[in-house]
Image (cartoon, grey):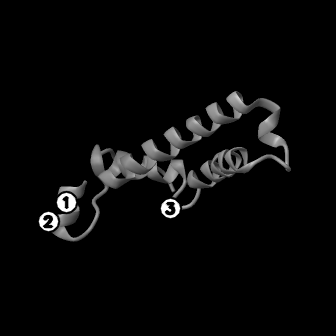
Amino acid sequence: MLTTQLRDGVLGPESSIAKLFWASWHQRLGELAMDVLGTEATALGAGPPQTRLRHGFLNSRAETIYGGSHEIQRNIVGERVLGLPRGPR
């Protein structure tokens, strides 16, 4: 992906794979943090570590939407990376 960016000056469709991976990984990490913190994760008066982890967890949900939803990214991967035919629109 970086080679394509440096060579062509634009990101190719493989960037959709990275976006899918990152958003899914970040969600799982946030869920793990909330599991470890337990009820401390929801306390509004919690200290900075809990606040940062809670914010990261909530933000990870938005990552699957901004920049193109998971469904859109999967369509890009299927059509442009794997060469599958375009689905019904």
The residue most toward the bottom is 9
Residue at image x 66%, y 50%?
Answer: 52
Name the residue carrying label 2.
7
Disc 2 to disc 3: CB gap under 8 Å: no
Asked if labels 2 and 1 touch by Cβ distance under 8 angstroms, the answer is yes
Residue topped by disc 3: 67
Quarter of the rendering containing residue 21: top left
Residue type, numbered disc 3: Gly
- Mark nearer the N terminus (2 vs 3): 2
| Numbered mark located on residue 4 in the image | 1
Question: Which residue occupies the foreground of this view, 22 or 15?
Answer: 22
Q: How many marks?
A: 3
Q: Residue furthest left?
A: 7
**Left or right: 26 in relation to 33:** left
Three-letter code, disc 2: Arg
Residue 25: where, in percent of width, then height?
A: 50, 39
